[in-house]
Each structure stands twice: as structure tokens, then as C-alpha cells.
Amino acid sequence: MKFVKLFEPLQIKDIEIKNKIVMAAMHLSYSPDGFLNDKLLNFYEERAKGGVGLIILGGCQVEYRGAGYGFVAIDDDKFIPGFKTFAEMVHSYGAKCIAQFYHAGAYAFSFDKNNPAVSASAVRSNFTKIVPKELTVDGIKEVLEHHAEAAERVRDSGFDGIELPGSAGYLMNQFLSPITNKRTDKYGGSLENRLRYPLELIKLIKDRVGKDIVVGSRVSGDDLVPGSITYKEVAVIARKYAEAGLDYINVTGGWHESRIPQIPMMVPQGNYAYLAENIKNVVDIPVFASNRINDPYVAEQILRDEKADAICMARPFLSDPYLPNKIKENRLWDIRRCIACNQGCFDYLFAAKSIECMRNYETSREGTIDLNKKTENPMKVLIIGSGPGGLEAARVATILGHDATVLEKKDYMGGQANLSYIPPGRHQIRDIIDYYSAQIEHLNIDLKLETEATSDLINNYNPDAVIFATGVNWIIPDIPGVKEGLGKNIFLAEQVLNGDIPIGKNVVVVGGSGTGMETAIWAAEQGALDSKVARFIRLYDLMPRDEVDLKWLKGNRNVTIIEVLPRIGTNVGRSTRGFLMGYLNKLGINVITSANIEKFDGNTIQYEVGSDTKVLENVDTFILATGVTPNKALHDEIKSSNPKFKIYKIGDCKKPRTMLEAIHEGFKTAYKLDK
Ligand SMILES: Cc1cc2nc3c(=O)[nH]c(=O)nc-3n(C[C@H](O)[C@H](O)[C@H](O)COP(=O)(O)O)c2cc1C
């Protein structure tokens, strides 16, 4: 496929953008005092260099009550110089920039008791759990004025536009929605009244700066919250916004509090483009599609199908700043795709940390790392294990001019990532293996498969440094009956996900970590109708539609998870755990917690919950997801021999954690080899 549409210019009012690739607003939490500092500038400079057409900066604080810690601010003239430098930098690369305003209303935390969060009504927020203060009519005027003054500052800084915050459940949404707007004055009640605040905001900003710069808005394409605004009403609202003078609409998914997944890996690529199309069908201004579009083919197709006029990507720019140029230059193999793991972005944001990226150690460290500076002390480096951490170490070491060799005992590369991508909704993890496979080839790295490392082999190789990336060993719990059943009807999750073992109808997954949950979902979907088969059956009406739906959505296994802790998924990031729980629920997976397993006996498992002894019978297959331990025996053996070469442990063989630590430690270790 040729990417013809993606690289056509995008016209918004009188500004021409060089392509149809937009970098969405991301609150990165890089700015402790609101200033647009060097860290932010360096971060965005890489993206501007990387060929993006339009950068949306922000969200930017327009008043203290609407934002929170770490936001870029534009609520004072003192922030103008930083914005000016930013605009000049972006323009110097031929890109354009828009500042997104941020007023979260009741979604902002009330850090200051004297100045609490405000909203349309004093309705407790399902997101922050706070009860905001209801804005008076004068209070509304004040908030509008904050936006208008900020808009003038943005214009005076040389930006190309402003994006108003009408998405995610923020203040504009809180006025629009009947579930958060309970007012009885002219700002509440009918849709016309609930539209008053957003329309006043649009008109005011247009009035103050509209002749000089573009004014757009991000909107929720559907609130995805029961009782709130649906995509049908959004079409009406969007038309009103366009009539009020908006220059573009950037369509995202629902509110933060929505139970519908919008950002995790389980959301299919381009899933929410239908919401952009819904708006594009009723307005004449440019419409952007957003959320989970990281693939150039998907992006190009959305444009070809006229579902949107531009493609807005956020996390894909965390994982690869040079995405547009790589697409343009047809270097697709070189793209480090965002896989929506959320480990370094949303999970860090929820943990009040500044943003990083699992796939890209350099993100957030721009300006402090230089891979173009070759080593003056080339080393012979042996890397044991070809999981993502080991491969990242090999990639970085080679780029820096070291001589890296990777030893892998299996006949394929990728380590645990090969298992991680098997469960439903995790397929994109495969991208990591594909990426490293291409890098290995491109950098001509010596990867020796089916080569088990031993201390003799390592010593004979005479390396300067050895990096152990040997991963984990799976734990087999010491519970009566396990040994007897192992290999008969008790298997490790690893063996089952590998496809080595057929599973029966009644399945018990032992252990409710992320791996246990995903393995249970995988098991519960076994036997489901393939999508193409379901489509065929529907097309020819071979079965009643509700029956097809059922057989397509769910497999034909009965699955139970049994876990010793009171909760499952304790090791899963906050951005994903709730959605996994919902997924288990939809598939009818039975979850038993606080269960101490006493014994396995043939097809039964006996366990204790509190003082009750319980038994599950007729279990065909037990799958053990009972944890892992570091596989560090070889490292320890080499270490105890006092080797002449440097040795390092990275990733899970140091301590089992996530892929983020593995990849980042791979990078860091290789980067510092000669230091
Ligand atoms: C760390 C982070 C911060 C974000 N902050 C904002 C924000 O301030 N305003 C906004 O409209 N969207 C924000 N988003 C949402 C993104 O713009 C985008 O809609 C979302 O990540 C889904 O798109 P993607 O799959 O391309 O990442 C943020 C996303 C991330 C990862």
C-alpha cells in the first residue's frame, strides 16, 4: 500500500499542515512549575524532527482549579517566552503547533481546600471521588475569561491554534451531560441549555483570537457512560460547535470513568474511527480520528474511507518520535510501534510519575542520550538470552560500535514475549519480536539460536562483557498431588499457551496474576467461532443471529481462576486491570479468591476459604500460573569464578518485573558498557 493520503497536506482554515499526521495532546508531567522547560522542548523537538505535521501541546493549565501537578501552564504572562521558544522550534521543522487547554472541572483533584475543583453542579465525580463546587453564573464568566486570556497568550506566542477540552469527561462534558449537570438555570436542563457553556466558550475564544489562529476542540465521540451523551447526540452537538465557528474537531473516545476500554491493547486498531466518521458525516470542518491508531496501513485506510481528515496519534509518538518519516521513507520495519501496554505512560501517570515509554528508553531523556556518538573502546559483548531485554542490549551495543553476540538456547528468538502475545487482546506484543528481528538483520547482529550458554562456552569466547538476560523459571508449587498430575492433567501456563497441550472442557487456572488472568481469558475463548466463519454464517442466515453472537463471543470451555490472595491481577497496571476484570466477567470466568489450595487429586482440587473446605470436581485441565523466579544460576556460577570480564544481569533474571524494566535495563547496560 502506498501512503498517499497520509502525506497529503491538511488544510485547517488558513493554515496548511504538511501532512495528515497529528500528535495528540499528552500531559507528560514534565513541568513541576508550569514552565515549558528544556525537557519538554527536547522531547517535542525529536517529534518535530521526526516529520509530524501538527503537534498539539498540552493539556495546558488555564487556571489552577482545572488542572494539577506537572501541567504546562499558560495562565500567566510569565509562561509566554517558553511558548514562543516552543512555537519557533516546531516551525523550524516545518510543522505546526496548537495548544490544548485543560480544564478538567470535577476531574481535577482539589489540592487546595480554599480553591476546590469546580463543575456545572456539585455532583460527586466517579473519577476523582470528590464533590466539586457548583459554578455560579459569575463563576462561569470567570472560567470563560481564564480561557480567553490564555488564548491571547497562546496567539501572542506564535502558536497556530488552540484546542478546547471537550473530551474525556472534562468541564465542557460536565456541562453537556445530564448526569453531571443538574442545574436549573439557563446552563442546565435542556440540551440547548447544557450546550450554553461550551458554545459560549467557543464563541468567546473565536471572538478573541479566531481571526488570527485556528480554534478547534477535542470531543468525546460518545461518552461511553450510562445515561450520558451518546454518539447520536454528539452528532447534534458537533454541528452546533461547527456553527459556532470551530475550525476542526478532534474526536476521541469516552470519559475517563467509562468502563469501556479505550486505550489498552485489547482495543482493536482504529476501533474508534467510527466516532470520527459519525461527526464527519455532519460537519464541513476537518475531523481527526484518534485512539489506537498506530499502524500506517490502518491510518491510511481511515483516510481513504473518508472516516476522518487527519489521524491523531499520542502514544505512538512516545515509542517512536520518527514515525512519520519512517512511513514516508518506507522504513516500516524500523518503526517501534506503540503496543498500548501503558506500562510507562498511563500507569506512570496514575502513579504520579512523569511519562516514559516501555519500548523507548530515550523517551523523557531526550537531549541526554546520543546514540550517534560511537564508543572509543569497542568491546566484545556476549548477551545470554534473546528476550526483549537481551535484544535491546544487543541493538544499542551494536549501534554504539561494540561487537555483540546473542546466545539463545531455543530455536526462536523473543523469550517470554512469545507467550505474552498469545492471549486474546495481547497480539500486538508480537510487534516487539518483529521489531527486534528486523533490527538484528539490519544491524547484522550475530544471533546464535539453539545455543545453550555454559560457563565453558562463555569463557572460551573471551568476552569483555557478558549481559545475562536469561529470564525466569516457572514455579511449580509444592502442593500435594501436583507432582502426580504434572504432565497428565496439570500443566504450566507456558506449555498451554505454547500450544503444546490440548485443554479439556473444564479448566482451572491456578494463580490470578496477570498471566493467570490472560491464560484464563485465552482458555475461555477456545472453541469460539472464528470472526470470518461467524460473518459467513450471518451472511447466509445459517443460524439465528443471537446464537451466532454467543458462539462468536465466547468459547466452549468452563474456566475458573483460583487465587490465594483476596484480589486477582495485583501485578497488573491500573490502566489495564479494571478492563481485564470486566473481560473475565463478560466471558463468564469464575473467580475464587482467598483460597488456600490443599491438594490436587485426579480431577478434583480441594481448597480452603476461611474455615471452609471446598472442592471443585470434574476438572479436565489444571493450568499453573503460580509465578516465576529469576533464572540466574549461570550468572551466579560465572560470578563466583571471579571472571576477568564485566558481568551484568538485566530484566527478569535480576528480578521478575515487566517488559519495561527488561528493555530499559537492556538499553542502560549497553549504553554504559564502556563507562
Ligand atoms: C501520558 C498521556 C497523557 C495524556 N494526556 C492527555 C491530555 O492532556 N489531553 C488529551 O486530550 N488527551 C490526553 N491523552 C490521551 C491521548 O491524547 C490519546 O487520546 C490516547 O492516548 C489514545 O490515543 P493513542 O492510542 O494514539 O495513544 C494522554 C495520553 C497519554 C498516554
Image (cartoon, helix red, strand yellow):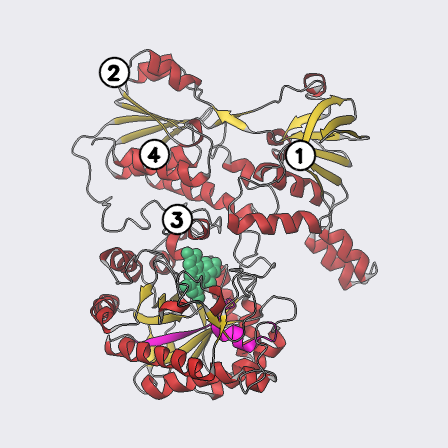
The magenta-colored residue range is: 160-179
The residue at which mark 1 appears reads as 594
Residue type (three-letter) at the residue carrying disc 4: Ala
Name the front one of labels 3 and 1: 1
Residue located beneath label 4 in the image:
394
Q: Position of residue 210 (x, y in %)?
A: 34, 85
Q: CB atoms at circles 4 and 2 under 8 Å apart?
A: no
Distance from Cα at disc 4 to Cα at disc 3: 19 Å
Q: Residues within 10 Å of mark 2 (few under 14, many from 20)?
A: few
Sequence-wise, which precedes: disc 4 or disc 1? Answer: 4
Residue bearing mark 3: 357
Rate crowding at label 4 as few (under 14), some (14 to 19) or many (20 or more) other CA atoms within 10 Å: many
Q: CA distance from mark 3 to mark 2?
A: 35 Å
As for residue 230 lying within the magenta part, the answer is no
Of circles 1 and 2, which is in front? Answer: 1
Would you say residue 330 is visible in this rendering? no
